[in-house]
Amino acid sequence: MNICRHTLHAFGLGAILLLAAPAWAERLVTDMAGRQVRIPDEVRRVYAVGHCIPMVGAVAPDKLANNYRLGEPAWRFLSPAFREGKIMPGTGNRLSDEEVMRMAPDLVIMEAMPGAMEHAERLAARLNTPVLLVDLDMHRYKPAFAFLGEILQRPHQGKALADFVATRLEPIAERARSIPADKRVRVYYAEGPDGLSTNPAGSSHTQLLDFVGAVNVAQIANLPDEGMSSVSLEQLYLWRPDLILVWTPAADRLTTWKAIMENPLWQPVNAVKQGRELQIPWLPFSWLDRPPGSNRILGAFWLARTLYPEVFPFDLTSLTQEYFRLFYHREISAADAQYLLDLARPRAGAEQ
């Protein structure tokens, strides 16, 4: 009888302690901007802001609460986990605070950039959700993946991604630094529907050009918000690019590509005269920019090999397959990889 009373007493004390404990455990972490933030011990649902989407998806696509609104051709090359149960914006690329609160994330991941610390604090207060900042600089991918692996309780995947960066990506920047100045390819990054918008060197949107040793010919100021700047054809005549890289939000319709190829005023531009225009592959995300996230790792292989084949004699087909397996959690065939690589060279006048 005494044993029963003792057992009941212990059970009652345990129940009281359990009720008095917090509803969930927390941990204190330091993000990549040096901020100390309390987050749930178990993170199950993450709202990734903009450029962070591919990066969070690479670590834990099942925990990613949102994604861009992508077309069917893009979904074909991503694991179903990038799509299933995800909240996507009805228009544009952004979700409202109300939409984010309805998804009830445990954590928000944002890009660490100028002004982001204040923005993160305001967003955390509005959403009543902890916000962590992650560095998306291409030279900081290794610690970023290791950090996300720990935060999202996927340390082995975070390490695998960080190791891939160390062995595959970082040597590109090292080798690129050895390319003589007079051997560097001069590139114009053609954006917008008419190709007469761009970003200069120093912008996160063109970091990949610097990373692989290209020269960005756009001699213009970087806007405070890193938006696209307008340029003129007269400036392009003077800049004399060796190569034009073409991007457009309607890449599948080749709108910018056709605007350049079919406008006679573009024909005096050095690269156009020499037939040196490349459509940036865009599936499932652009390989160069928009978003300037971890999708640029694949673009680094493609662009380095394209610009300097003697310096970077990669097997692009196998590298593309390896990247998709690790970052997009999708096995693709050699034929699929070649299809994606061939998007860079559209047939004249053809729709993709």
Image: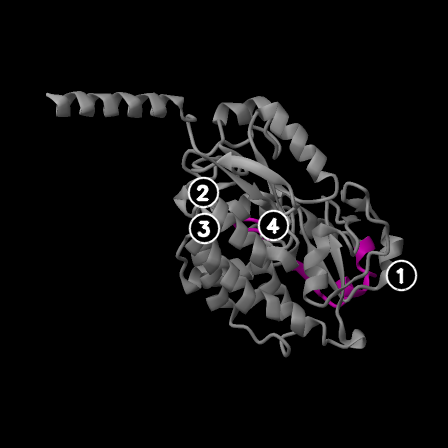
Whichever of labels 1 and 3 marks the residue nearer the N terminus, that label is 3
- What residue does disc 1 label? 238
Q: Could one spot residue 99 in this view of the protein?
A: yes
Mark 4–mark 1 Cα distance, whole angstroms, equals 31 Å
Amino acid type, callout 3:
Phe
Considering the numbered disc 2 on the image, is that residue within a helix, a strand or a loop?
A: helix
Observer able to see residue 280: no
Q: Secondary structure at mark 3?
A: loop
Q: Nearer the viewer, mark 3 or mark 4?
A: 4
Pick the front one: 47 or 317: 47
User: What crowding class fits label 3: few (fewer than 14 Cα within 10 Å), some (14-19), or many (20 or more)?
Assistant: many
What stretch of residues is rendered in magenta? 265-286
Q: Position of residue 64 (x, y in %)?
A: 47, 39
Provide the secondary structure element on which disc 1 rests: helix
> Which mark is first along the chain, 1 or 4?
1
Q: Residue at x 64, y 43 (%)?
A: 111
Q: Residue at x 61, y 32 (%)?
A: 94
In front: mark 3 or mark 2? 2
Most extreme residue toward the left, as rendered?
1
Q: Mark 4 or mark 1: which is in front?
A: 4
Image coordinates of residue 119 in percent, x first then y, are 69, 33
Magenta stretch holds residue 313? no
Query: In the picture, residue 3 is in which quadrant?
Result: top left
**Mark 2: amino acid:** Phe
Q: Tell me, for residue 77, which label it has, or none.
A: 3
Which residue is painted at 72% across and 62% down in the image? 210
Most foreground residue, 227 or 8? 8
Label 1 or label 3, whichever lies nearer to me, is 3
The answer to whether residue 96 is left or right of residue 331 is right
